[in-house]
Image (tube, rainbow, N blue to C red):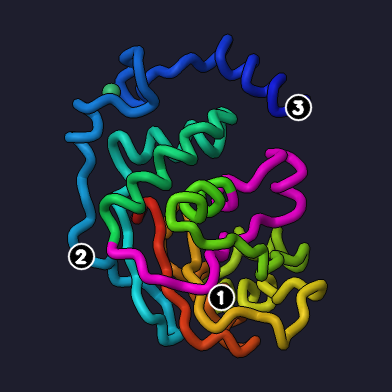
Amino acid sequence: MWSIFRKLVGLIFYPDVCVYCGALGSLLCSNCYEAIEWSLLPPKLDINQPIASLEVVSMYNGPIKSLIQKLKFYGVIDVAQVGAELMYQSLNLPKVDCLVPVPMHPKRLSQRGYNQTYLLAKALGKIMDTPVANILLRTEYGLSQVEKISRPQRTQVLTRQFVINPSLQTSKLPKSVLLIDDVVTTGTTLSACVKALQTAGISVVHVATLAHGY
Ligand SMILES: [Zn+2]
């Protein structure tokens, strides 16, 4: 029922218009698709753990920035599908046991009502025929601190924030995962996620994000 209501609201307020230029017809028109600044090389990030691969669709600008903003701040959740298709088409994605979205802080999740990274992972998982698992949780610890402190301290606090979902049995954790995020900047958040996954024994961690910001 809720999904039908949301769809109706979406059709009224957000008919299929291009997220960047506003042209009617699709969520990303062909002109804006052509304007995407594809990321040809993986960005240099502060990821201290060994990762199997790192792939990024685009710089955080132009149509991709617009797409992520619509998904994150304007509730246009259908664009998660577009983001997932862009990832699938442009990235060299590995075969893994499951996709793992970067979790959202519980307070943010209750404010926004959804985790855009989970929506992205879900849409991508459907295309890749790979399950999505909320293996990671983000604890409440230290949210206000994270926004105020220096980078080394931030890494420490973030590392404590990401934990393996306690409802999952350690013996049933996958061997290989693809960690999904929407935007990566320094990489400290991803690094903390990778550390939590590897500490739990998940040795093969690939990473894919939609955009790389500064
Ligand atoms: Zn357009």
Q: Nearer the viewer, mark 3 or mark 1?
A: 3
Q: Residues within 10 Å of mark 3 (few under 14, many from 20)?
A: few
Give me the C-alpha separation between circle 1 and circle 2: 22 Å
Quarter of the rendering occupied by the C terminus: bottom left
- The stretch in magenta equals 92-118
Residue drawn where x is 33% and y is 26% of the image: 20
Mark before the other along the chain sequence, 2 or 3:
3
**Do the residues bearing badges 2 and 3 touch, measured as CB atoms within 8 Å?**
no
Toward the front, the furthest residue is 129
Answer whether residue 100 is magenta in the image.
Answer: yes
Please state if 67 lies on the left or on the right of 146 as rendered. Answer: left
Residue at numbered disc 3: 2
**Ligand 1 occupies quarter:** top left
Q: Classify mark 2: residues with Cα within 10 Å, few (<14), some (14-19) or many (20+).
A: few
Residue 164: x and y in percent read 70, 76
Residue with the mark numbered 1: 192
- Tell me the CA gap for discs 2 and 3: 41 Å
Residue in the picture at 42% in, 59% down: 184
Eyeballing the image, is 181 above or below 51?
A: above
Residue 176 location, x and y as percent? 50, 79
The first of marks 1 and 2 along the sequence is: 2
Residue type pointed to by label 2: Leu
Tag on residue 209?
Answer: none
Amino acid type at mark 1:
Ala
Which of the two marks, 1 or 2, is nearer to us in this view? Answer: 2
In the current view of this chain or complex, which residue is farthest to the top?
12
